[in-house]
Image: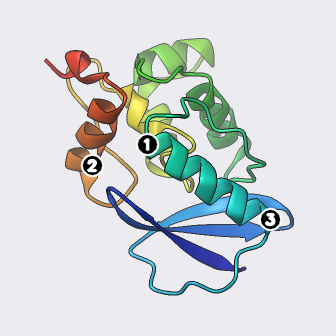
Amino acid sequence: MPTVSVETPIGRIGLVEDDGAITKVLWSVDENPPANAVQREAAGQLNAYFAGELTQFDLPLKPAGSDFQKSVYRQMLAIPFGETKTYGEIAKALEGMPQPVGQACGSNPIPIIIPCHRVLAANGLGGFSGFGGVEMKITLLRHENAYPYLI
């Protein structure tokens, strides 16, 4: 699967494409082969997101995961820019429990684009599936002016 890297304010991010859809976001990728159309579009949207010009990604996505994980990914995609939900709120929407929702968030293969950073624990930040852990989650929430939720 071809991976192309994009320089962003939070470091180099790799975009993995397979069969016309983004399947993974990787951290600290060194390779930079020629990008295909989907990767070029994803790179452009990531740059626009970090420039403050894009609040919702519009990309073909094909994250790996169980049916339950994919249902959690869809719930995360529905959280608007600058807003957050808790694991419990997503669990309630899916008629499930918060812990499996948290595990599904942690398995998110396309962080930032599928915004797992917008999902918080009932009494704190919770984790983050991408590089940098909770510190990166805070950075992304601040970028979206969602930092009042951190206080």
Residue 123, percent across and down?
Answer: 21, 19
Residue, x 23% and y 45% (percent of image)? 134
Kind of residue at badge 3: Ala
State which tag comes first along the sequence, 2 or 1.
Answer: 1
- The three-letter code of the residue at mark 1 reads Ala
Q: Separation of disc 2 and disc 1 at Cα?
A: 17 Å
Disc 3 to disc 2, C-alpha distance: 28 Å
Q: Which residue was labeled with disc 2?
A: 136
Residue neighbourhood size for the residue with mark 1, other residues' Cα within 10 Å, grouped as few (<14), some (14–19), many (≥20): few
Residues under numbered marks 3 and 2 in contact, where contact means CB atoms less than 8 Å apart = no
- The residue that label 3 is drawn on is 37
| Residue at the image point whose x is 85% and y is 62% from the top | 20
Q: In the rendered image, which quarter is residue 118 located in? A: top left
SS of the residue under disc 3: helix
Compare marks 3 and 2 and give the one earlier in the sequence.
Answer: 3
The one of 23 and 126 positioned closer to us in this rendering: 23
Q: Quadrant of residue 55?
A: top right
Q: Residue at label 1? A: 51
Report crowding for label 3: few under 14, some 14 to 19, many 20 or more residues within 10 A (C-alpha).
few
Q: Position of residue 36 (x, y in %)?
A: 78, 72
- Answer left or right for 149 relative to 109: left
Q: Nearer the viewer, mark 2 or mark 1?
A: 1
Q: Secondary structure at mark 1?
A: loop
